Image: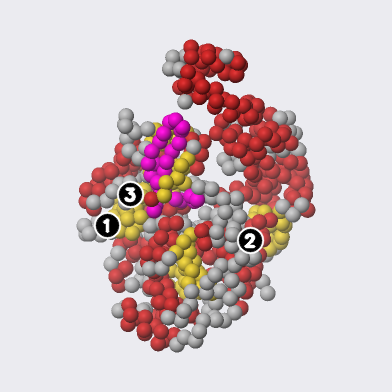
Amino acid sequence: GKEYAHRIVEKFGASIFDVIDQSSQRLEEIEGIGPKRRRRIKESWRRQRAVRGIMVFLHSHGISASRALRIYKTYGEEAVDVLRANPYRLAEEISGIGFKTADEIAAKLGQAADAPARLEAGVIFVLKSAASNQGHCALPLDELIRQASEVMGFGDTDGIAASIDRLVRGEKLIRETVDGQDLVFLEEYHSAEEAIARRVRHFARLPSSYPPIDGERAMEWFEHQANFALGEEQKRAVAEALRNRILVITGGPGVGKTTILKAVLGILEKKDVTPVLCAPTGRAAKRLAESTGLGAGTIHRLLEFQPDGRFGRGPAKRLEGDLFVIDEASMIDVLLMRRLLEAIPDDGHVLLVGDVDQLPSVGPGRVLADLIESGTVPVAGLTEIFRQAAASRIVTTAHAINRGEMPDLAAHEADSDFFFIERPEAEALVETLVEVVGRRLPAKFGLDPLRDIQVLSPMNRNSLGTRNLNTVLQSVLNPPSEFKFEIERFGVIYRAGDKVIQTRNNYEKEVFNGDIGNIREITTDPARILVRYDGGRDVEYEPGELDELQLAYAITIHKSQGSEFPAVVIPVGMQHYLLLQRNLIYTGITRGKRLVVVIGDPKALAMAVNQQESQRRWSTLRHRLQAP
């Protein structure tokens, strides 16, 4: 443990390794270390000996122990050689290490500022950051050079341009002029866009191959079975789904997307059509299964994703099934959509369902929007709100915001499902939020603050961001106690009972970005953290892996995509003004199933409602779909 390590170092200083190796009995001079613990320390040290030189080398170059261990696990005893040869491999191959860390190590190893390996790594880093942070599939050449120059603090733009040319010749990058714009792509994003366009055009060319169906009679049969009358828009959508090989169904909350799905699936079941249902996240797949009464899984599971990053399903081993229903399609980025479409059999049918007005995918591209805007795929757009849904203020507020109208914020009847609490000052807003989550909602609606209520913030930073709100809510909802173990890593305290969220895909553990769970237990010897996720699955983490987890009392609206929560609380303040956009607030409000509470400044909310998505995503999928 940390305490004994500290005592040992304090007593023996630099000779610690010699003491453990040659005269380990001296460890017993330290209070609390007896023969048993001494043997354990020596055995542990023996196991670590291979790692020792590597760890010391890495530590001397400013790499933390947990990251050093990750490097060792990846490269084994060749780690030092790999680093000396090309430290920039770390940025590409080790999660949690970016270009800046690799660049610092390279500088300490004497790497020149204009070394080709450095310039190429800087360019790739800029393109990867543009993809993961802004969703770009490419960048204009001049913008790429400008950003790379800034990131590397290197003013020789000709040198950067030459490194881009080398990467293009080596086929790591693709350069292409689209609509008069000179664009540079990472090869995987370029080939993903091309593959999506190829597969979509294949499906769009073919008529449906379902057995003959009299659409009108089939819908009458469904209405009789369901004791429910379909609206005109819904009837058109069902008819399109029965007629076409590929169809996009898009619309906001309360417009009956689920009813259309039930109708299509019910009608086709009678014709012995085999459906396959999937969604991008575990929560979305669970909701799809509950709403249709059929089995549904994540796209990764459907494609038999392997821990080594490969997919068991693809062009060489296609999926089995006749109709592939893909829900929450707005969340799917170009890389995953490519994998999915390439795995669907040539004679399959594709039904993409989503809400194009929500936030685009976290990953690169804007696939659903590009499909709709291209005009090359049939689209059923739904706008009619059904009577039952129209009674919900969550639904009517979301639609008003989506139309660019300021919703009615006046106090409403007690049984309303949407409330706005005016708190323009940040400090008062946080106080009210804690009161609402910790006391008022549990008292009035019987909601569990951990299980049922989710705080959604537009951002991570500032007092209204997730980091501060998590610290505040943790102290109220899960305060420290002598009966609860806790561990501090990466500046965050993790405590038994905490609500946490996985922040990146970990295929080995089968947990994915956005999965929410609770810390069941923390043990100190050996140090490990056990997290229970939805469905009762327990996943174990070592302390060095905790940078994959964040507290989840408050999460960003982006992270909430594809999830629904019984109750949602959203802080909206002028601190967020740079991020306030219509689709962000719209997405946040539509996450609430039974209750939504917005707390904050009406001016900030008005700013969000009036601000259409201002930043374009560099994506050329629409152009490829429209190409002859």
Residue 41 makes an appearance in the image: yes
SS at mark 1? loop
What's the residue at 71%, 30% (across, down)?
Answer: 109
> Where is residue 583 drawn, in percent x and y?
45, 58
- Look at discs 1 and 3 and give the one toward the viewer: 3
The disc placed on residue 192 is 2
What amino acid is labelled 3 in the image?
Arg
Q: How much space separates mark 2 and mark 3, taking CA atoms?
A: 38 Å
Residue 607 makes an appearance in the image: no
Residue beneath disc 3:
451
Residue beneath disc 1:
410
What amino acid is labelled 2 in the image?
Ala
216 in relation to 45, above or below:
below
Q: How much space separates mark 1 and mark 3, taking CA atoms?
A: 29 Å
570 in relation to 107, above or below:
below
- Look at discs 2 and 3 and give the one toward the viewer: 3
Q: How much space separates mark 1 and mark 2, taking CA atoms?
A: 48 Å
SS at mark 2? helix
SS at mark 3? loop
Q: Which residues are magenta?
A: 510-535
Q: Is residue 95 magenta?
A: no
Picture quadrant where residue 255 is located: bottom left
Tell me if label 1 and label 3 are in contact, CB under 8 Å: no
The foreground one among 462 and 345 is 345
What's the residue at 57%, 50% (across, down)?
Answer: 307
